[in-house]
Amino acid sequence: MSDVWHPLSWKNFPALQQPDWPDPQALDETRRNLSGYPPLVFAGEVRSLKAHLARVAKGEAFLLQGGDCAESFNDFRANAIRDKLKVLLQMAVILTHGISKPVIKVGRIAGQFAKPRSSPMETRNGVSLPSFRGESINDPDFTLEARQPDPGRLERAYFQSASTLNLLRAFTHGGYADLTRLHTWNQDFVANSPQGQRYALLADQLTSSLKFMDAIGVNAKNTPQLRDIEYFTSHEALILEYESALTRQDSITGDWYDCSAHMIWIGERTRQTDGAHVEFLRGVKNPLGVKIGHTATSDEILRLCDLLNPENEPGRLTLIGRFGHNQILRVLPDLLRSVRQEGRQVVWSCDPMHGNTYSAPSGHKTRHLDEIMTELRHFFAILQAEGVWPGGVHFELTGDDVTECVGGSHDIREEHLAERYETTCDPRLNAAQSLDIAFLVAEAMRASQSR
Ligand code: PEP
Ligand code: CO
């Protein structure tokens, strides 16, 4: 790593997964524009999230992170944003009730556009074109023109993020997230599912408690906790030109913050300890995540802790395991022990999506709820056995009634995948499947707390 960090010091290191921008001047112009635009989030909010995550690191709260694999320019609608928020709020209610601890809500939204790819080129019927890298880079259509990286798309992603965040701020502070509206978060197509009904029963129970509290004088008018929620944003910090252009020095502390989101993470493919992504992230004060897959070694993880959290500050670093249901038992216990033996303060979170992706016979990429649940159950059991707090969970989900993952209370099968397969990247849980999973997590947490 370089001795002196600055927002562009990453340029002295190998940066994987960056597009081959065809027009350097256009890229310069975009970078200049983005550097002059207002920040999307503020340093004070970022510090607030870090303080919450410090409580997670100490076992006093739980992190719930989720949203699209990749946001899309086409699916940019108020209802889609609202429905994703609804699902996360419902999941948070189920978890808060189940584990009796605060749930920190972090959306994978308002900036989650760019995707790492396993190959820079895609070949179809003998034709090879640059891979689709997310809509902030190029277009998914399979033509040479569509696949040319275009820096103007980074600006479009910035403006879409600003507008998304504006609506989320309005929803979370304008009465929509008020706990007296618990029932209205249950969407029509979910309400009749077993999980929707289970949620409605819980909402009934909580609504009577709220009525009781209102009778003794505690209500949404006089108690902000019942009215407003704190909701944070996050995405993979993949495209370093974008992230560094949105990095600003805080006038109060003089520290640097990546103001594109509250929390940012490094993906499994770009977490090299001598790479540009680690160099960039080590210099900003945001809470950071690192995805770790089944090939990760204890030495790598400890080195990442040294580089990204040299002061061992709780809340700074979240390790997001994405091992796969058939690898987690083999890999996680040793990693956990090494981190604990070295006294590193981290949040351990489980992404049960990315290690469990497979292709169905129809060619659709999918994930089975049983395997997602198996990885989650193993995660809670392993952490409990090691005496470490299972800090959080990370999902790809949507509020829509899609058919992208199989299994769950609506019993989606592989032959149903084509019906509503709408993701531009990885398969997401639909709203009913997300509730299924939230109830499972609450049960698994309760079981490990009572032991
Ligand atoms: C993702 O979160 O969409 C992703 C690409 O994850 P990972 O880096 O864990 O593969
Ligand atoms: Co994904």
Image (spheres, grey):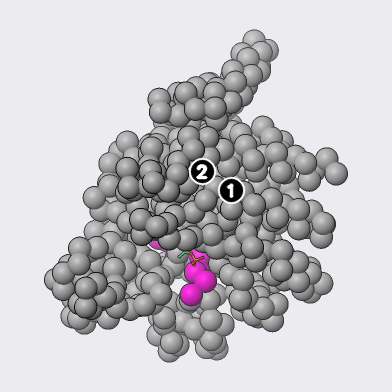
* Distance Cα–Cα, label 1 vs label 2: 7 Å
- Is 77 placed above or below 191 here? below
Query: Which three-letter amino acid code belongs to the residue tagged 1?
Result: Asp
CB contact under 8 Å: marks 1 and 2: yes
Residue wearing tag 1: 370
Image quarter of the C terminus: top right
| Residue 88 percent across, percent down from the top left | 50, 40
Instruction: Give the SS element for disc 1.
Output: helix
| Badge 1 or badge 2: first in the primary sequence | 1
Quarter of image, res 91? top right
Q: Residue furthest right?
A: 451
Task: Note whether residue 161 is visible.
Answer: no
Residue 231 lies in the magenta-colored region: no
Q: Which mark is residue 116?
A: none
Q: Tell which of 223 and 382 is nearer to you.
A: 382
Query: Is residue 47 or residue 25 the one in the foreground?
Result: 25
Q: Position of residue 422 (x, y in %)?
A: 32, 49
Q: Residue furthest left?
A: 145
- Amino acid on which disc 2 is placed: Gly
Residue found 45% across the figure and 41% down from its top: 412
Q: Residue at x 64, y 52 (%)?
A: 374
- Determine which residue is flagged by label 2: 407
Q: Look at the image and say whether residue 264 sits in the magenta stretch.
A: yes
Instruction: Please identify the quadrant where the N terminus is shown.
Output: bottom right
Q: Nearer the viewer, residue 231 or 418?
A: 418
Residue 323 in percent (x, y) is at 61, 65
Among the 4 quarters of the image, the one containing residue 419: top left
Is the distance from the Cβ of mark 1 to the nearest ligand 2 atom less than 8 Å?
no
Disc 2 element: loop
Q: Which residues are magenta?
A: 258-269
Residue 99 location, x and y as percent?
Answer: 71, 38
